[in-house]
């Protein structure tokens, strides 16, 4: 009988410590859900971009990127000739140069679907498949030749779990979605009532 009482007592006090941490997680989660990260970072105070320039190399050729209020154009340096989009063969060459992976095939992606693994990247973009066991795809920017993203089965599993965690089952990025807000408030109520019940002598 004494042993049973001790186990129940340990469980009772362990539960309150866990409940307090769950309460902290819930309160912080509510803050994240109800506040857009862009606003927290102060993005609303940025003034419109002036014209900016960047020089980079693409397959040995120097390219000038002109960013005029978010509109990007490209020309060769110093000749100032217009720059064409990369070909599929050039995308494979860049994937070989900039990664340790072995490309197998390439395709050009020109439209977005919700929740895709290349979301947030500029289109059109090249998808370069590789011969890895982890299903790795390399995404190559069609103008700059930058490696825009590398996605694997490990990343896809992480992405799925992240979607379940933030309850955004479509876009998989929005931590301010309504469903998360509702459940975070319900979790807060559950945590608080659980702590209250702990201190009550009778339930």
Image: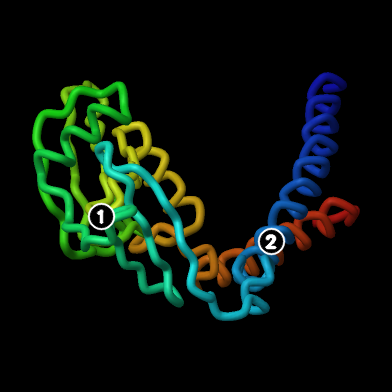
Residue 132 at what x, y percent from top left? 21, 22
Q: Which mark is residue 190?
A: 2
Q: Nearer the viewer, mark 1 or mark 2?
A: 1
Q: Residue at x 32, y 52 (%)?
A: 63
User: Is residue 189 placed above or below 69 in the rendered structure?
Assistant: above
Label 1 and label 2: CA atoms lie apart by 51 Å
Q: Residue at x 72, y 58 (%)?
A: 28
| Crowding at mark 2 (Cα within 10 Å: few <14, some 14-19, many 20+) | some
Residue identified by numbered label 1: 143
| Crowding at mark 1 (Cα within 10 Å: few <14, some 14-19, many 20+) | many
- The kind of secondary structure element at disc 1 is loop
Residue 82 at what x, y percent from top left? 21, 63
**What quarter of the picture does the C terminus occupy?**
bottom right
Q: Residue at x 25, y 38 (%)?
A: 59
Q: Nearer the viewer, residue 168 or 60?
A: 60
User: Is residue 34 placed above or below 121 in the rendered structure?
Assistant: below
Q: Nearer the viewer, residue 11 or 2?
A: 11
Q: Residue at x 17, y 50 (%)?
A: 86
Q: Is residue 94 left or right of residue 119?
A: left
- The kind of secondary structure element at disc 2 is helix
Q: Which mark is residue 134?
A: none
Quarter occupied by residue 129: top left
User: Is residue 160 placed above or below 121 in the rendered structure?
Assistant: above
């Amino acid at each position: 009988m004494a042993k049973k009482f001790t186990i129940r007592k340990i469980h009772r006090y362990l539960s309150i410590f866990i409940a307090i941490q769950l309460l902290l997680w819930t309160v912080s989660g509510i803050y994240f859900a109800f506040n857009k990260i862009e606003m927290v970072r102060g993005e609303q105070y940025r003034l419109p971009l002036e014209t900016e320039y960047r020089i980079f190399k693409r397959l040995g050729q120097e390219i000038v990127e002109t960013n005029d209020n978010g509109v990007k154009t490209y020309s060769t340096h110093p000749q100032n000739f217009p720059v064409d989009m990369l070909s599929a063969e050039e995308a494979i060459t860049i994937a070989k140069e900039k990664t340790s992976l072995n490309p197998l095939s390439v395709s050009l992606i020109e439209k977005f679907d919700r929740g895709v693994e290349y979301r947030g990247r500029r289109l059109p973009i090249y998808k370069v498949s590789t011969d890895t066991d982890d299903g790795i795809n390399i995404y190559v920017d069609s103008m700059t030749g930058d490696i825009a993203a590398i996605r694997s089965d490990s990343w896809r599993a992480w992405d799925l779990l992240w979607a379940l965690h933030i309850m955004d089952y479509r876009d998989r990025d929005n931590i301010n979605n309504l469903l998360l807000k509702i459940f975070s408030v319900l979790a807060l109520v559950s945590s608080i009532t659980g702590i209250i019940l702990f201190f009550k002598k009778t339930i």
